[in-house]
Image (spheres, rainbow, N blue to C red):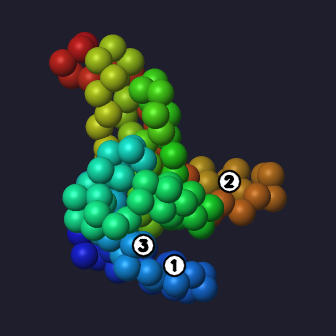
Amino acid sequence: MGDQTVSYLQNALQEKGYRLTSARQVIVQELAASGGHVTADDLAVLVHEKAPGVGRMTVYRTLELLSELGLIRPVYQGTGAAHYILMDGGHHHHLVCSVCHRVIEFDDCVLGEIEQLICSRYRFQVQSHLLELYGRCPDCQ
């Protein structure tokens, strides 16, 4: 995740009619630099280090906006605080170990046919998806 992700998020904001303020630029850059997996509080700290004038509430409001636009999603993996993940290309996938709670991200998306079948059956239009599979990682097997 890097410059391409930053450009994608910035373009998406502008295409939806939102101004790309300097605060939003820093927030988007730090979100991408974090690998697209970060809590709101951790992101606020990262942003404050780069731009001390950007307040915590600005970070929260920007995360809320990005969530409303479907560019990121909050996920809760038993830690209490939501982690915001980038919905790069409209999807995100995790393997979650039910023993050590390790999260392994994978990019292989095999949901194309299933998505089409479900959409057809329920007359539903999918905009994005988050897939989480739970089990045991190699260390916990």
Secondary element under disc 1, as helix, strand or loop, is helix
Question: Quick check: marks 1 and 3 in contact, CB under 8 Å?
Answer: yes
Q: Position of residue 37 (x, y in %)?
A: 34, 48
Q: Amino acid at mark 3?
A: Arg
> Would you name the residue on which mark 1 appears?
13
| Residue 35 visible to the viewer | no
> Would you name the residue on which mark 2 appears?
117
Residue drawn at 44 percent across, 66 percent down: 89
Give residue 7's quadrant in the image: bottom left
Residue drawn at 42 percent across, 26 percent down: 79
Q: Amino acid at mark 1?
A: Leu
* Label 1 packing within 10 angstroms: few (<14), some (14-19), many (20+): some
Q: Residue furthest front?
A: 53
| Foreground disc of the pair 1, 2 | 1
For marks 1 and 2 on the same chain, the one whose residue lies earlier in the sequence: 1
| Foreground disc of the pair 3, 2 | 3
Q: Position of residue 47 (x, y in %)?
A: 30, 60
Q: Residue 86, which numbered label?
A: none
Residue drawn at 70 percent across, 51 percent down: 118
* Label 3 packing within 10 angstroms: few (<14), some (14-19), many (20+): many
Considering depth in this image, is 19 or 52 the residue closer to the camera?
Answer: 52
